[in-house]
Amino acid sequence: MKKILFTLLVFSSFHTFIYLQKCCAQNPLVKKWDKRFGGDDADNILSIQQTADGGFMLGGQSWSGNVGDKTQACWGLTDYWIVKTDSLGNRQWDKDFGGVDFDWFYSIQQTSDHGYILGGFSSSGISGDKTQATRGLGDYWIVKVDSMGIKQWDKDFGGTDDDILYSVQQTSDGGYILGGNSLSGMGGDKSQGSRGLNDFWIVKTDSMGIKQWDVDFGGTDIDGIYSIQQTRDGGFIFGGFSNSGIGGDKTQNTWGVLDYWIVKTDSLGNKQWDKDFGGTEYDYLHSIQQTSDDGYILGGWTYSGIGGDKTAPLLGTTDFWIVKIDSSGIKQWDRGYGGTDWEDDFGNISQVAGGGYLIAGTSYSSISGNKTENNLGTEQTWVLKTDSFGNVIWDKTVLSMGHDEKGLIIETRDGCYVIASMTSAGIGGEKTQTSRGANDYWILKYCETLHAAFASPTSVCPGSCIDFISLSLNATNYQWFFPGATPATSTDVNPTNICYANPGSYDVQLIAFNTNGSDTLTLNNYITVYPSPPPQSITQNGDTLFAIAGSASYQWYFNGNIINGATDYFYVAQSSGDYNVVATDANGCEVEAAIFNVIAGLTPALSKGEGVMVFPNPVVDKCTIHNALPIAIGITMGTAIKISIYNLVGEKILAGNREQFGRSDILQLDCTLLPSGMYYVYIDNGENVLRGKFVKQ
């Protein structure tokens, strides 16, 4: 009646071992390929993204001539250099853009027309690819190219001093948002004076790079921006570092020397709110991204220990520091990551499919803290993947024989990862190509190991249904096979209500897929379906209802409701109605019997209110009488008690007194020699008689 479905997740040590062997690894990444790009001098990568065709766009600055992988010489001291690859990292084309002086690249993004927007800092006048003179010492310089890297236009924006562009993004209206640092007062393209020594400066342009508006944000000291992004409400979020106190646009004091500072504006650049996050020392924000819950994830590096907004201890000299905030800028949690040395450059942070985060930078640390691999060279790129609460899932040290800088990571559309670094290394570690110059661009593709694994109950009763839990790693699609069950197949991640009707042993197979392949796990005789328990029935003798004896446990029900304490194989009916009993065998399997329209009060029950109970009933060999002490019938301990047993025709078969049967309230009678039939038990103290009855099989 009350059938128990075995839907709880139960692990045996064997199945835990399977899970550990197939699923869990500190670093599950498998390298697919690596590529190096460089000229004869220093080439420093600072940006990477996957393109619409599945390839990759790499951007940075170059000092190299037209040698090696570089097909154009620099115009000046340093130029922008971009490299387009296919999906396997093979170079398709490269382009150099610059004037005759310093042109320092920071940002690239593919645009809606499949071209690209490039941005950075320029001190060049009109020359080379630059068509406008600088306004001050250095200006923002953006270059728009088509899908093959052919320049379409370029624009210069600046005030009367240094203005350094760190981030450029295309906006939803087809224009561009530019974010960087400004030392300039009002003048040139800058319509507002500086609040302090250095401010955030935001410039909005149309699709042709024509300025629509600009706005300055700052406190009374130094404020530097590194990252900007348009938000889903059409506004903008941007951030960097600040050592300003309350003043100007800043509404909170710093906790330490430098803090993270972020500003949220509407679509026209009007400030909606700002927030400061920091510890007691130096904290530099490098990357900010809106998350799927409309909050934001902030990433940078820190010198601070516990204090202020920082709840994580400092593990080394410097650590990476991540802060998660909600849509209003309220901190939800923070995490620190590092070894016992320097975590030097912070590259980027991004949210990945499933809600976790990728973090990248570089590290000098050996195995310690969160770092599980030693460096091979001096400074190596270090990346981590976390869950949605910042708990580390895995970390990876990208090994080379040299010194690596920057450290960037992106998730690719096939669920893998591409990591980018600038490196001085030759062949060695995970680098398979020689060095071209002082520094080269270096990119690597990794995929997480695909493993099929699952868990479920492994032993059930006939007619029971099972829920299966996939523990597969890095799978996107699933094919399950359940021979002997209904249904026999499923493509669900976690199949439910897989039902087994018949006793036996059954195999389970799971094939886990992603775009990189499949992994199959087959467990033979994984599911055991116990034999069916023997059938039950209920017989009635007077007011007493009898189930078939021999089950491990019993539970009686009256009119569908459980009868508390009714757990023997017999039950004395107290009321007229319908009765059910559920008998459970040693395997925990249940069988049910019912009897309907029981009428109570026909004959004296085994325990008719006077407190005497006889069991088991029917009796095979020994019969036990409960509650037979004299106090049960209200007399003193010295009173003689007579106990008699009569058959159905009134013949006395057995007789004795209390001393013969013992002084306990539990009396045992040996009924082995009694013929089969019905018998009555009488307990007589001379004033009162207690009566019960039993059946001898």
Image: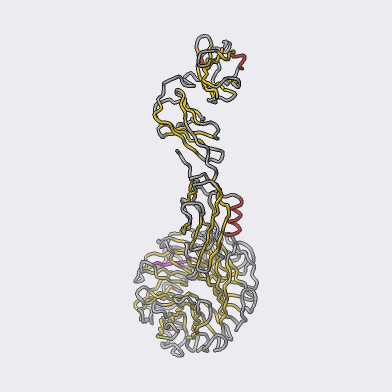
Per the image, is 261 magenta?
Answer: yes
Identity of the residue drawn at 54% across and 55% down: 508
Per the image, is 666 magenta?
Answer: no
* Quarter in which the C terminus is drawn: top right
Above or below, 577 relative to 530: above
Q: Which residues are magenta?
A: 259-264
Q: How far across and down, in percent of the image, does residue 495 sit?
A: 47, 54
Q: Is residue 251 left or right of residue 74?
A: left
Q: Is residue 120 left or right of residue 336?
A: left
Above or below, 639 relative to 492: above
Q: How far across and down, in percent of the image, does residue 42 sit?
A: 57, 83
What colour scheme has been applied to the protein in the rendered image?
secondary structure
Q: Is residue 636 left or right of residue 581?
A: right
Q: How far across and down, in percent of the image, does residue 516 sit?
A: 52, 69
Q: Which of the two residues, 571 or 446, is positioned nearer the viewer here?
A: 571
Above or below, 326 relative to 128: above
Q: How far across and down, in percent of the image, does residue 687 sit?
A: 50, 9
Q: Main secondary structure of the magenta part?
A: strand
Above or below, 161 relative to 373: below
Q: Which of the 4 image quadrants contains residue 41?
A: bottom right
Which residue, as the protein is rendered here, is positioned at the far top?
686
Q: Which of the two residues, 200 or 196, is positioned nearer the viewer here?
A: 200
Q: Is residue 662 left or right of residue 493?
A: right
* Quarter in which the N terminus is drawn: top left
Residue 67 visible at all: yes
Q: Which of the 4 image quadrants contains residue 507?
A: bottom right
